[in-house]
Amino acid sequence: MTNVFVIGSAGKVGIRLVRKLAARGHRVGALHRKREQESDLETAGATPIFGSIRNIDAPSLANIMHGSDVVVFTAGAGGAGIEQTNAIDGRGLEIAVEAAKLAGVRRFLLVSAFPEAWRERDNSEGFENYIAVKKLADAYLADAELDWVILRPGTLSDEPGTGLIKANAAIPYGTVTRDDVAERIVGLIEEPAVRRSIVELTNGNDPVSHAIAKPRR
Ligand SMILES: NC(=O)c1ccc[n+]([C@@H]2O[C@H](COP(=O)([O-])OP(=O)(O)OC[C@H]3O[C@@H](n4cnc5c(N)ncnc54)[C@H](OP(=O)(O)O)[C@@H]3O)[C@@H](O)[C@H]2O)c1
């Protein structure tokens, strides 16, 4: 049983992850920012923790995450604008990393994005800022003395999980279901040997449970 602290727990990836973790017997602390999300998180099997990554400093967040074994950061501004993206995907990630260090939580999993995501569809200022902020967040975490994994899923879909993915340090850009992303995160939590790695992820042909444990030749 692992104690997992999820930031962004009520999001579309987050809630799927919470359900899967609870079903596998892990204990989940679920940071969420709206009161009405509490009952869904409880039903999903988590302990809801009300708070916003915008309104907290690292020492306070460290107190909340103290005793966790793993932090998962899957929060994001979700297209709410440049200022929000900078505050949540950017500064929020930095606060969470500093909090994990203060709390002595060594393992930190970040849900990031392919740097080349959506190039053919959206090159607005807001989207370019999002891509830049995600990359700087990756760089911030990669510089931390933590057992980090940066997971870069392709474009996310709400289709049912396929159980089949492609995952490696560099793969062609594509799409992936949120179910399969959540399943892969569970795998990473249960495979602590995978550390200080960037993992790009799309749907593919490899069973999600073996995709990282068995390196490709
Ligand atoms: N969309 C894509 O195709 C795509 C592709 C690759 C990577 N990603 C990244 O994958 C991650 C998860 O995606 P998703 O689809 O699950 O996104 P999502 O449904 O928008 O979930 C993001 C979560 O972050 C939470 N959040 C926002 N501001 C917060 C704050 N101040 N404090 C605490 N939590 C806060 C949101 O809270 P509320 O529920 O209250 O809004 C939401 O629950 C994001 O980082 C996203 O950038 C997305």
Image: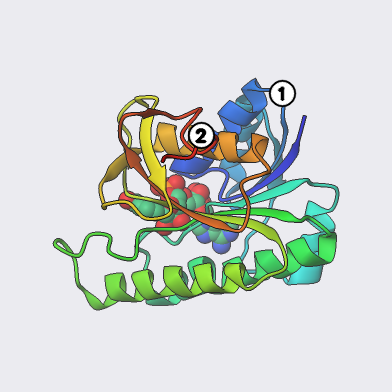
Q: Quadrant of the C terminus?
A: top left
Q: In front of the other: label 1 or label 2?
A: 2
Out of 28 and 53, give the one closest to the viewer: 28
x and y percentages locating residue 35 in the rendered image: 61, 46
Tag 2: residue type?
A: Lys
Residue appearing at x 55%, y 35% in the figure: 213
Mark 1 in CB contact with mark 2 (< 8 angstroms): no
Residue appearing at x 66%, y 34% in the figure: 190
Where disc 2 sits, the SS reads loop
x and y percentages locating residue 123 in the rendered image: 19, 72
Q: Which residue is mark 2?
A: 214
**Side of 195 relative to 29 (left or right):** left
Res. 25 mark: 1
x and y percentages locating residue 18 in the rendered image: 59, 34
**Side of 71 relative to 216 (left or right):** right
Tag 1: residue type?
A: Gly
